[in-house]
Amino acid sequence: MKLIILDRDGVINEDSDDYIKSPDEWHPILSSLKAIALLALHDYRVAIATNQSGIGRGYYDNATFDAITDKMTTLIENHGGKIDYIAHCPHLPDAGCECRKPNTGMLEEIKQHYALDSLADVWMVGDSLKDCQVAERAGAKPALVKTGKGLRTLAKFNGESPYPVYDDLFHFVTSELIR
């Protein structure tokens, strides 16, 4: 089975420092929709691992998260793609949960969902240091995109990222997975 794990905000959709609190605030990165369609065309399963502390902060509730997810999956399907599984952490950063990235709970959940022994052949694509760290900790392959908070993340490394860096999800997919 071919599997890829994506962060949501900043990889699939535009990110916001004020959180994505409603379906109206969720705006796709069009090249990401194309990338996910290309993955589907090549028999990849696409899972999402996303921190959603806005739920814990009271900015939106689970029903709103579900509505945002419905908008996202509909737009992806309209472009020919498919999201197979979504793991999310609704907890605050100081909650001490195992699911909040960079902890590995969500990636372990995804691994169990697909009955995998290992994530060694699975890429985790994100726009933050936490995304890359969780990939490493879970035994997956990390990749950083410049969309979302990616450029800020890259700046922390003074331009010398220890992780492979791509302009966006589409460039990652066409460089690493589908040539």
Image (tube, grey):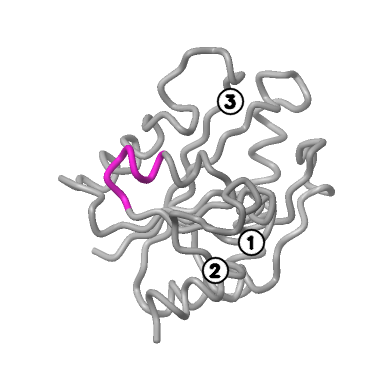
Q: Which residue is the site of mark 3?
A: 90
Q: Which residues are magenta?
A: 134-140
> How many residues crowd around disc 1 within 10 Å: few (fewer than 14), some, or many (20 or more)?
many
- On the image, the x and y values in percent for residue 157 come to 57, 49
Mark 3 or 1: the one toward you: 1
Q: Quadrant of the N terminus?
A: bottom left
In primary-sequence order, the first of circles 1 and 2 is 1
Q: Residue at x 77, y 37 (%)?
A: 19
| Label 2 element class | strand
**Would you place residue 120 above or below residue 138 in this image?**
below
Q: Residue furthest left?
A: 117
Secondary structure of the magenta portion, mostly?
helix
In front here: 63 or 90?
A: 90
Three-letter residue code for mark 3 = Pro
In front here: 156 or 178?
A: 156
Cβ atoms at labels 1 and 2 below 8 Å apart: yes
